[in-house]
């Protein structure tokens, strides 16, 4: 019993990871909009120099948003932790390029913020 309380308390106090928030968002998108097509752009993570070189050589773009939702128009989603998540200089530059092309980039602080921003974005285009 004591062990369970400690584990539950530790989990409750652990800072939420950006990847956990993104996973929750993807699960929600699949349930809420089952016909919606979206995909992630896996730009983060520790990699060897040779793997980084290969990824950049084959088109990886540092600073690209985490998710692309193929709605009309396409929507780009950058996930950040609820607290403490900041955009890198590369992300700011790529987001500026995407917006200059006329697309929307949502910077979302956690699952709930992402959910609300996506609902607002989709309803804006559905209701004209």
Image (spheres, grey):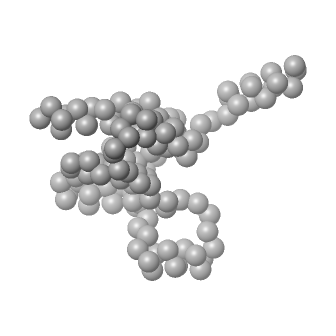
Which residue is found at the position 63% from the left and 73% from the top? 48
Q: Position of residue 44 (x, y in %)?
A: 53, 59
Q: Position of residue 86 (x, y in %)?
A: 46, 46
Which residue is found at the position 39% from the left and 59% from the top? 64
Q: Is residue 81 visible?
A: no
Q: Position of residue 120 (x, y in %)?
A: 27, 32
Q: Nearer the viewer, residue 31 or 124?
A: 31
Q: Nearer the viewer, residue 17 or 125?
A: 125
**Residue placed furthest toward the right:** 2
> Is 32 on the left-hand or right-hand side of 51?
left
Which quarter shows the C terminus? top left
Q: Position of residue 67 (x, y in %)?
A: 40, 51
Quadrant in the rendering for residue 95: bottom left
Q: Does 88 sit above or below residue 127? A: below
Which quarter shows the N terminus? top right
Which residue is found at the position 38% from the left and 40% from the top? 34
**Residue placed furthest toward the left:** 128
Give the mark count: 0
Q: Does 102 sit above or below residue 118? A: below
Which residue is found at the position 20% from the left and 57% from the top? 100
> Is 104 on the left-hand or right-hand side of 20?
left
Quadrant in the rendering for residue 8: top right
Q: Nearer the viewer, residue 69 or 62?
A: 69
Q: Is residue 44 visible?
A: yes
> Is 30 on the left-hand or right-hand side of 14?
left
């Amino acid at each position: 019993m004591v062990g369970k309380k400690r584990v539950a308390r530790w989990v409750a106090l652990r800072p939420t990871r950006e990847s956990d928030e993104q996973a929750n968002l993807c699960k929600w998108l699949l349930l809420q909009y089952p016909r919606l097509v979206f995909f992630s752009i896996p730009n983060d993570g520790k990699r060897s120099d040779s793997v980084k070189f290969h990824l950049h050589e084959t088109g990886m773009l540092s600073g690209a948003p985490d998710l692309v939702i193929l709605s009309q128009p396409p929507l780009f989603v950058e996930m950040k932790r609820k607290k403490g998540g900041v955009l890198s200089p590369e992300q700011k530059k790529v987001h500026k390029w995407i917006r200059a092309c006329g697309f929307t980039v949502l910077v979302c602080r956690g699952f709930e913020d992402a959910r609300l921003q996506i609902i607002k974005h989709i309803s804006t285009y559905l209701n004209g």
